Image (cartoon, rainbow, N blue to C red):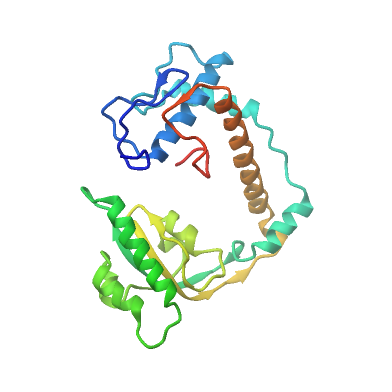
Amino acid sequence: MSMNDTTLLTRASINGVALHALDDVLTPDELRQRAYSELLRQEAIRQGLLGADDPSLADGITSEAATSAIEALLEQALTIPDPSEEAERRHHAAHQATYSTGERVHARHILFAVTQGTDVVALRNRAETTLLDLRCHDGSTTVDRFAKAASTLSNCPSGAEGGSLGWLVNSDCAPEFAKELFGHTDVGVLPRLVHSRFGLHVVEVLERDPGQEQAFESVRGAVTLALRQKTYVTALRQYLGLLAGAAQVEGVDLEASDSPLVQ
């Protein structure tokens, strides 16, 4: 059994500190999140921001003291400069859809629901096979393959309507679903599965209404926050890479995640 499956056969650790009990079952992303948190917790202790008696993360719970100490550690370790006005204007011009109001998306989907006892690997394989088939036939007018697939495969009541979700606004959707639908320009079957708290979705965007574009001056605060967040994530990734490079890391691959702290 590979480590890409959800079962771990050995105990992962950071500098000899276990990240889980031997009988714990963690996904690779959950394990990486725990490893990064433990790296920061240990560095906070080394910097004198946290007592050496603070409990480890073997049970997956970060103490309140450790949470505060890690926040203080990152505040002193990461330098996040304010973006220049030129950079802000470039970002605004390149992401007009993001800074528009009243954006709507006409979409349909096929839901592969994750429920208790679901074989997630098999479910993902079915979802990816469906996605590939529909992408290969995207735009076909002879048979509405998407509607047919939705009616037979979708775990959402919308399957009876060919997967139709109608016209959606951002607030109609779970945040993780909205992130993939709004602020983009692509139309058709989206190129990758959309993950949400409900499961895996194959999504087709039928039409887009971009709404009303907002002038730079009216949304500058949001633009600044977006660029600062992007800089923060880059700085955090680099900092965690330095900590990992200086640590003894066992049983966890810290190079496999695009985002250093998986939420």
Measured along the vertical axis of the image, is residue 3 above or below residue 190? above
Q: Residue at x 43, y 11 (%)?
A: 53
Query: Is residue 37 shown above or below 110?
Result: above
**Can you name the residue that lies furthest to the left here?**
117
Q: Residue at x 59, y 41 (%)?
A: 233
Identify whether 116 is placed above or below 241: below
Q: Residue at x 39, y 73 (%)?
A: 134
| x, y percent for residue 87 | 75, 53
Q: Hey, which quadrant is residue 111 in on the image?
A: bottom left
**Residue 123, percent from left and from top:** 29, 56
Viewer can see residue 43: yes
Q: Is residue 196 left or right of residue 116?
A: right
Q: In this rendering, does residue 107 appear at all?
A: no
Residue 169 x %, y % = 46, 67
| Quadrant in the picture for the N terminus | top left
Give the total of numbered labels.
0
| Extreme residue in the front direction | 1
| 186 and 223: which is toward the camera | 186
Viewer-nearest residue: 190 or 45: 190
**What percent of the width, then of the height, locates residue 104?**
49, 71
Q: Residue 195 occupies which quadrant of the picture?
A: bottom left
Q: Quadrant of the C terminus?
A: top left
